[in-house]
């Protein structure tokens, strides 16, 4: 890490200097500092607080070469005493309108499990309950055509937990989408709870646009009349039929977060991260006030915000700018990149004294507190300068947030609306290309700057920002929902899922956040799966039958799932004992199986550019490809490894010669395990290998022979699976599209 005081120019990397090192920020918490505060003219009387050193380190850094100011807010890394989590008051506001009965199949290669979106929402709610104890309280509201308070805020004792579960299980989808009254009832549950020592939060999940009893003047104008709200509101949009601009506006106005859940595979991780952020909250109601000379202008740089406040005249040549921040988590800083106008020379900063006051309430006490800092008042108690990497990152982060914000103009009603005209999107695509080319941190190799570049233009599945704007179809279908969610995480510096590189950096230095996330992950995976509520159509001997599906054995697939194949570099043991890569297998190759040597009949080669594989020793395999150490007990790689790897290239599956014994359909891979092969003969039952299509030898063989290039080598090329449009069940393999035979080179992107 390069220090800003070092003026040496690194090729391709702009040097950001702090020349006024003697005028860098001081904490303002010593006795002398407080005496100076008291003498300052036009100061604002702070709220009452315990006159002890503030637990939050507030710093002001003047970046002279950029005419910028970085405000750094650093909370404690860990609580002062050991706790499992910070106590919370959570009200779940759940959409139970008719569309919530829609299918929520396992993403990737999985079958329709009979679970609906509401079933998975219930499971997420059970996970939240599991993570709570008697210090926490939970309330429940449902909304469809009407809204209903299912449960007031009640402490999560064992008995109350079971009652809450029963109430959640009883939810049935029906009616329209009356979001407004659901939200109102959620807010009302916090009446007379202002002095609660718990972190208050309302969590709203919906899969559609509100279409009943919407406030005539608009949601945000109506919410302004209710301000201040008693709790932050966190909104979760499932699927693609969303009014994302509204969901983001509601969350932003209340100090909460908006998260987009594109499919069932993301519902677990999004809820897990949202609750982990709540349970690692250090401070609530945080607000930053900056006072400075009226000849100076301070400009916020991260784009529009519903809760944006203009600077006001504080009298006697002073201006005051207030920036609401909401919750602050243990171990995760909040950093603002602000542009200074009116002081273009570093030496002039002393003429524009900037005073910062951060007010907040510590989460588990609700006691008001504050931190102070000054820049340019002649003080000499300087803190360490920012490193070049960090300063450049905050500038780059602000530029990305501002760009994304430009795609969603803020209407007069306080709601964001996406630009969907094709010509406008083409212009923005060019602007994005220029932004990437000129981004200050594009050539830096530290984790923060590198992660941001990965999200901007990395190889798939990274590079989602560029991908979202690459075609009007992508933007309209999912980009207009994903980008506001991503910008929310980047602006507020929160980790909102496992998916994107830059948000994954946030919270990584918070032991409490990590512990809460791991505990919630484990709960989501291991709580008994909900009974499927949907009737699934199944084929039986040419006849179509209606049946309920057994609950999945593990809910882990609903956090992350993909196909059932091996990376091309996977090592396979031949019958001779020699080792070769799976990509080199062909028809007639003799491989080792648990029941002796067997010949390869066909090899399926599938082009991928968005696969998550798991590393087990030297083995790279998709999460749900059954493996066994002893050829008797089978499990999924996702349950055996904590080392996901991003992979672009080809993945391979193998069909061996016919054999009626299931154990004859496995190959020795990576020198560490047996990997099941296609057509193993197990189509039903509780065996981990069971699959109606992949276990049926003849159906697999016929499907593979329909693919191109099944010549003498027996290697066929596919591009995923084909599903029955009536049942959603896998029924074959999709052919590689014309002109796509050349996939990207295989590479490990971990």
Image (cartoon, rainbow, N blue to C red):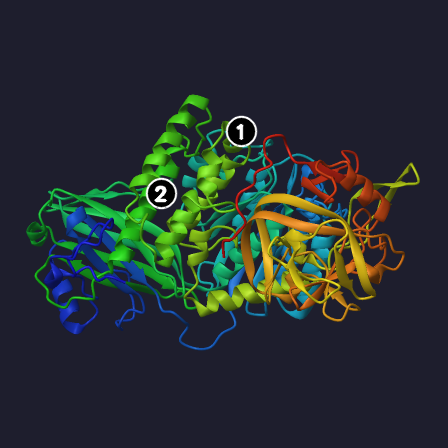
Q: In the rendered structure, which disc, 1 or 2, sits on the residue that comes first in sequence? A: 2
Residue at point 59% right, 67% down?
617
Residue found farthest to the bottom: 81
For residue 634, what is the image quadrant? bottom right
Q: Pointer 1: residues within 10 angstroms few (<14), some, or many (20+)? A: few
For residue 162, what is the image quadrant? bottom right
Residue at point 52% right, 53% down?
497
The alpha-carbon separation of the residues under discs 1 and 2 comes to: 22 Å
Residue 107 vs residue 91: left or right? right
Res. 750 mark: none
Task: Please provide percent x and percent y for residue 506.
Answer: 42, 58
Is residue 208 something that shows in the picture? yes
Is residue 303 something that shows in the picture? no
Q: In the structure shown, which secondary structural element does the residue marked by tag 1 occupy?
A: helix
Q: Is disc 1 in contact with disc 2, using a CB cutoff of under 8 Å?
A: no
The residue to which callout 2 is attached is 400
The residue to which callout 1 is attached is 473
Task: Please provide percent x and percent y for residue 636.
Answer: 69, 61
Q: Pointer 2: residues within 10 angstroms few (<14), some, or many (20+)? A: many
Residue 725 vs residue 188: left or right? right
Task: Please provide percent x and percent y for residue 538.
Answer: 85, 41
The number of numbered discs placed on residues in the rendered structure image is: 2
Task: Please provide percent x and percent y for residue 673.
Answer: 70, 67
């Amino acid at each position: 890490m390069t220090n800003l005081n070092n003026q040496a120019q690194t090729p391709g990397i702009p040097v950001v200097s702090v020349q006024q090192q003697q005028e860098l920020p001081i904490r303002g918490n010593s006795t002398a500092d407080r005496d100076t505060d008291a003498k300052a003219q036009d100061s604002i009387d702070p709220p009452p607080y315990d006159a002890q050193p503030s637990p939050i380190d507030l710093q002001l850094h003047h970046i002279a070469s950029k005419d910028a100011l970085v405000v750094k807010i650093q909370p404690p890394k860990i609580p002062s005493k050991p706790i499992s989590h910070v106590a919370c008051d959570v009200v779940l506001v759940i959409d139970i309108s008719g569309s919530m009965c829609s299918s929520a199949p396992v993403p990737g290669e999985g079958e329709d499990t009979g679970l609906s979106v509401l079933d998975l929402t219930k499971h997420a709610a059970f996970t939240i309950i599991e993570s709570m104890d008697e210090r926490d309280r939970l309330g429940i509201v449902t909304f469809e055509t009407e809204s209903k308070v299912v449960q007031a805020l009640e402490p999560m004792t064992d008995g109350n937990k079971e009652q809450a579960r029963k109430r959640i299980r009883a939810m049935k989808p029906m009616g329209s989408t009356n979001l407004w009254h659901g939200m109102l009832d959620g807010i009302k549950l916090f009446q007379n709870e202002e002095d609660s020592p718990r972190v208050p939060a309302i969590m709203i999940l919906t899969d559609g646009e509100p279409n009943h009893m919407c406030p005539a003047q608009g949601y945000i104008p109506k919410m302004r009349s209710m301000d201040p709200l008693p709790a932050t509101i966190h909104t979760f949009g499932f699927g693609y039929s969303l009014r994302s601009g509204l969901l983001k506006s509601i969350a932003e106005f209340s100090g909460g977060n908006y998260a987009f859940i594109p499919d069932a595979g993301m519902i677990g991780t999004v809820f897990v991260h949202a609750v982990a952020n709540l349970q690692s909250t250090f401070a609530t109601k945080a607000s930053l006030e900056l006072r400075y000379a009226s000849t100076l202008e301070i400009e916020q740089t991260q784009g529009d915000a519903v809760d944006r406040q203009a600077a006001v005249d504080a009298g006697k040549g002073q201006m005051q700018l207030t920036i609401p921040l909401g919750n602050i988590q243990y171990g995760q800083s909040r950093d603002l990149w602000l542009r200074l106008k009116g002081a273009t020379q570093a030496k002039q900063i002393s003429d524009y004294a900037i005073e910062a006051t951060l007010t907040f309430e510590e989460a588990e006490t609700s006691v008001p507190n504050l931190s102070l800092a000054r820049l340019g008042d002649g003080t000499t108690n300087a803190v360490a300068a920012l490193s070049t990497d960090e300063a450049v990152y905050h500038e780059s982060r602000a530029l990305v947030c501002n760009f994304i914000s430009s795609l969603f103009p803020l209407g007069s009603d306080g709601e964001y609306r996406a630009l969907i005209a094709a010509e406008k999107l083409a212009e923005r695509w060019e602007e994005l290309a220029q932004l990437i080319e000129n981004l200050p941190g594009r050539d830096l190799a530290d984790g923060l700057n590198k992660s941001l570049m990965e999200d901007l233009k990395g190889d798939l599945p990274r590079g989602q920002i560029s991908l979202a704007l690459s075609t009007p179809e992508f933007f309209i279908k999912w980009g207009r929902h994903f980008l506001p969610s991503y910008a929310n995480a980047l602006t507020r510096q929160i980790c909102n899922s496992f998916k994107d590189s830059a948000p994954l950096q946030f919270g990584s230095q918070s032991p409490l956040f990590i512990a809460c996330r791991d505990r919630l992950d484990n709960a989501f995976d291991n709580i008994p799966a909900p009974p499927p509520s949907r009737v699934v159509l199944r084929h039986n001997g040419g006849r179509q039958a209606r049946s309920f599906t057994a609950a999945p054995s593990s809910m882990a697939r609903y956090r992350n799932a993909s196909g059932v194949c091996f990376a091309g570099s996977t090592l396979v043991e031949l019958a001779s004992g020699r080792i070769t890569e799976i990509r080199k297998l062909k028809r007639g190759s003799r491989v080792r199986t648990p029941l002796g040597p067997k010949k390869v009949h066909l090899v399926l080669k599938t082009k991928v550019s968005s696969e998550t594989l798991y590393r087990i020793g030297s083995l790279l395999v998709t999460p749900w490809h059954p493996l066994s150490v002893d050829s008797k007990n089978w499990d999924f790689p996702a349950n055996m490894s904590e080392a996901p790897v991003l992979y672009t290239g080809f993945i391979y599956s193998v069909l061996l010669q016919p054999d009626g014994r299931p154990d004859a359909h496995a190959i020795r891979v990576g020198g560490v395990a047996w990997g099941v092969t296609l057509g193993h003969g197990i189509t039903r039952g509780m065996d981990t290998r069971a699959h109606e299509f992949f276990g049926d030898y003849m159906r697999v063989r016929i499907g593979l022979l329909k693919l191109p290039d099944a010549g003498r080598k027996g290697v066929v090329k596919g591009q995923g699976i084909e599903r029955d449009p009536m049942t959603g069940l896998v029924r074959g393999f999709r052919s590689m599209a014309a002109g796509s035979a050349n996939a990207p080179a295989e590479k490990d992107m971990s």
